[in-house]
Amino acid sequence: MYSKIFKKLIGHFGYKLVNKDLIKNNRILNNKNLISLSDFLSYLFENNQISNLIQVGANDGLRFDEINKYIKKYKPKTVLVEPISEHFEQLKNNYKDIKNIFFENVAIDVNNEINFLYKVDKSKINLYDDHIQGISSFNLNHLKKHGVRSHHIKKEKVKSISIIKLINKYFTSLDLLLIDAEGYDGFIIIEFLKKSNFRPIIIFEYIHIKHDSFKNLINLLKEKDYYYYDIRENIICFPKEKKPLIKLT
């Protein structure tokens, strides 16, 4: 009873508790799912569909990272984006022997609105599950929803760039765009779809995107002739003209 009252009270103030059991259950299901994100990526790379890519929110390049082994095996031109300084240094080290990779120690934002992020103090990170390292966010409450104590949270100043400027800095065409921005994903993709003529396959985490933003994003994907479906906590989007290439069953 008290739990229900508490959840209603939290909802009244605009917050929603993360159902950690739901997330963990999804991860278990994914281990035996008929088609996994890894299957999808394998299909794309084995059929020579990916010659370049951008990964936003690359973290250290290892934890819960589906793209690492494909970058190392197929060596596409790759831009890895990670704003948190200690993760960025780990990221560079984990790819130190791989050529054709470019690193950006920045946050991707819209309208220059992000100049800092909240993260778990590295001296306290071992007190939490492994996934906590990957939940840095411009939204303080995002960390609290994951059970991080207020006095374990630090604020880090970061540089930022728009997704359009980042793409134009490195590419004249783009095959794959991966985004894991802890709820900010929707804003990034909406700006990309509105302001860019590139037509990459897009993969992004959707579970932390607010409903109104998510609804706008899905409508925009339809407007831009993108097909989409979900795998685990991610949505895979591919442009209409690439539909014949997607033959996974």
Image: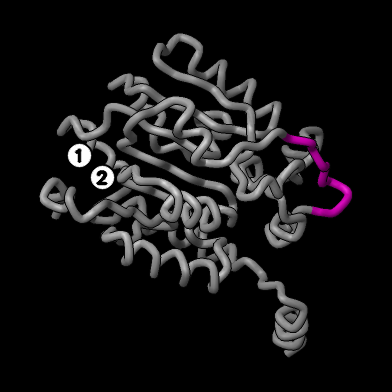
Q: Secondary structure at mark 1?
A: helix
215 to 221, vertically: above or below: below
* Magenta segment: 149-158
**Residue 28 visible at all:** no
Q: Magenta span has 3?
A: no
Percent position of residue 92, x then y: 56, 18
128 on left or right of 41: right
178 on left or right of 43: right
Residue 3 occupies quadrant: bottom right
Residue 5 occupies quadrant: bottom right
Task: Give neighbour class at mark 2: few <14, some 14-19, many 20+ (Cα, 10 Å).
Answer: some
Which label sits on residue 40?
A: 2
Which residue in the protein does label 1 denote? 43
Amino acid under disc 2: Phe
Amino acid under disc 1: Tyr
Kindly give the residue lying farthest to the right in the view shown: 151
Q: Give the position of the C terminus as an image quadrant.
A: bottom left
Q: Give the position of the N terminus as an image quadrant.
A: bottom right
- Give the residue at x 37% y 59%: 29
Percent position of residue 47, x then y: 15, 33
**Residue 44 visible at all:** yes
Q: Magenta span has 154?
A: yes
